[in-house]
Every structure is written in structure tokens, then in C-alpha cells.
Image: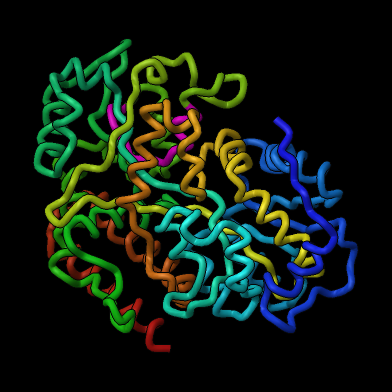
Amino acid sequence: MKIRIVLPALLIVSLLIVSLVPGCASKKTDENVVEMWVMPNSVEPISDLEAVLKPFEEETGIKVKITSVDWGAAWSKITTAATSGDVPDLVQLGSTWVSAITGMGALEVLSAEAIVALGGKETFVPVSWKTTEIEGSGQTTAIPWIVDARALYFRTDALRKAGVQKQDLSNWKSFKGSVKTLYDADLMIDEKTIAPLGVSGKNDWNVIHSLAPWIWMAGGDFLSPDRKTCTLDSPEVFDGVSYYISLVTDGYVPIEYLELNTAQVSGNFNDGACAMYFDGPYEVKTLTRPAAEGGALGSLTSRNFAVTGYPKGPKGLFTFVGGSTLAIFKGSKNKAGAFEVIKYLTSKPAQVEYAKVSGFLPARADAFDDPYFANDPNRKVFKEAIYYGRTYPPVPSWGLLEPLLTRRFGIMWDYVTSGADYNPDEIKKQLALAKKEVESILNQ
């Protein structure tokens, strides 16, 4: 459906004045072109986004030139651009990157009037809005675009055969009992042996995101409330990490899975090799997309899967919520045009359409009222998840802390998979080292 966008010339001029920090007028450029960097959010990242933007371009005459930047290279490319000044107009930023890039002084600050023009902060999912600024600064430098949240995928036929009910997955105690039941059942379906649970390890880009929910649900956290110290050596963090590791050390996860990343574990689940695993909303799209388009529709798993939330921990129910924002570089040559692109991409129709294309969740709260989400029980689980979800502290140093923690937690997984007798003291040692390394960054 064609979406009508009315943009009088006076509005474009006024946005230069009220939408951005005073005194930061755009450099002279072609107002009909916006340079945009995005990451591969879908199978065809450029053409898929171009299709969503087509009505916008037809109505406004603004052409969006899209460059796709691989996630593995994005941090380096964006920070290099930020320091050199050779930047696009508009950039996709991982939600955990905003505070770091903002701390470099590279992003345009959006005024209160600009935020109102987007519908106000109440328009967006609350946890995502927390990632739009340096914590406590009161200066918005990015706008939520797409959301990622984690939940539990499970094979309904495997659970039924083992005598496990969906409600048995609802808390830590019953979840572990259910995993044991699946293990003891020694399941084989369609001539395939099914492992109870799939968990990725040190080779996963999600290594922190995978551990975070268990840390939070045990009452732990990464940093103290004043953000001056690291709390990874707390008993609560140890309890959360230990519970998650015990799913492996108790034999419920094939040890070779710890050498895999999330995409590979996802492939195993889709192929029928494991009964449960944790992943984001894009897996629903994979399981409902034809094989000719890179999906798994028609497979046994696609006909026998469901999604539920994380099992509730002793201190509450949490999941990791990430995603991406859109930001305008201070060095942008077309700030007014870039703002109009943000305004369009965060409108309800565009949010729904891009969610359908990418598999990610909308950042705009009312987009979940669309039947695509409201009428699908699996997608509704993710809507619920973003409201009990958490993200990391939006402090400038987080961009340095994330790779540091990825390395330290990877070493921890190395110990778990080494074949040595499991010793909890080794986990405490790794957490203490993580604290020391984190605080070396915080105190710089």
C-alpha cells in the first residue's frame, strides 16, 4: 500500500532549525540525496530496504543511497568515519554502540521539537529508548529503529513425546527438570536423535547476550548503579552464570555445541537435532519462509515448533533486548533529508513492513497492534519479552567493555569444554578477572 508523505518546503527548512542542535546547519549539498549505512538486517539488505523506502522516495523526491556494512566490520568502519569526518548522512548503530559513538562527539543531538515530530519518546518501546543517549545526559542522539529480543524455541512434538508441558518451562527449577526429562527420554524423531538443549559458546558473537538474562534473573548486574565499579564478582552473578553452565556440565547440551555460534545452533534446531534453544524473532521468519528463499518452511521442525519466554529466575524474569537505532552524523551533508528518512522509517506502516522483511521487531510500540504481530502467538511472545527485557548501561565505555567481556567469557567457556573436572572456583576466578579488566576501562 502506498503511504502518502506530505512534506512542504517550509517543513524541511524548519527542521534544519528546530530538529537539530542550534548552530549545526547542514553543509551545502544536494537535498535530494541521503547517504545511509546499514548492516545486513535481512537476506537482501539493500534491495529489501529500498523496497520499504520506495513510497517515501516517490512522495518526497529524496533518493536514499544505501551502503551495506557487514556487522563484523561495522564498528571499525563507523568509528573510523566518526574520527575522520568522512561520514554518511545517516547510520544504523547497534543499540549498545550509541553511547560510545556519542561520547566521541560524532552524532547530531536531536532537539525536543524533533522528538515530538517523531511522536515523542512514548511512541517507542521503553527499553529501546534507553539506548538513545549517554545515560543521564538528557541529549538524544539516536532513534530506535528495530528491536531484538530473546525467547525460548521448542519442538512441540519432542516435548509431547517426553511428557513435558509448556508450563514446565516457566521457572529455573522446572526448566532444569524438563531438560533432564528430555535427556532421560533419549528421544529419536524421524530417525534423528534429539539433544535436549542447544547452547552456543565461545565462538558466538552473542556470548554476552546469552549470559546476561541468567545474570539478571539471579539478581546480578554488570556495573554498579553509579557505573563506577564492576559487579561481576558478586554472588548473584556467580549463581546466574553457574546455573547456565550447569545445563552443559550436567550433560544436557552436547559439548560440541560450545564450539558453535547462534546461527549454527539455529541450523541444528531447524534440522531437528535439538529440542530447545534460545534465539530472536528472526527465527520465526526463518521457520515460516520457503526453502527457496533461505527458510526452513516445510521441515519437520517448522511444523512442530512454538515459542515461550525465558524461565523465570529467583530474582525475576528478564531477557536481553538489543536492536538498532538510526543516527545522524554531525558531519552529515544533508541533515534535513536524513531526519525525514528517520521520520518515515519509524512511522507505523514502515515499521511493520520492515519487520516483515527483516524478521526483527518494531521499535514503535503501536506497530505491535498490527495483525502480523497481534494474531501470531509466537510473535506475541516477543512483544511480551521486550517489556520484561533489559539492556546494558548506556555509558560511553560500553563500546570497549563489550569485546573485553566477549573475550573473558570465551575463556570461561574454554575451561568448561576443556575436559577438566568442573570446579566452580575457576568460574569465580574468571569473573574476578572480568571485574578487574572492566574497572581498568572505567577508571581511565
Q: Residue at x 82, y 64 (%)?
A: 10
User: Farthest residue in the top direction?
Assistant: 190
Q: Position of residue 158 (x, y in %)?
A: 24, 19
Q: Residue at x 44, y 38 (%)?
A: 281
Residue 30 on the magenta span: no
Vertical arrangement, residue 108 with respect to residue 242, above or below: below
Q: Position of residue 443 (x, y in %)?
A: 38, 88
- Look at the image and tell me in which quarter the C terminus lies: bottom left
Q: Position of residue 107 (x, y in %)?
A: 64, 73
Q: Residue at x 74, y 52 (%)?
A: 67
Using residue 354 as the reference point, say whether residue 320 is left or right of it. Answer: left
Classify residue 136 by image quadrant.
bottom left
- Residue range in magenta is 274-286
Q: Residue at x 34, y 77 (%)?
A: 437
Q: Is residue 127 visible?
A: yes
- 29 or 295, which is in the foreground? 29
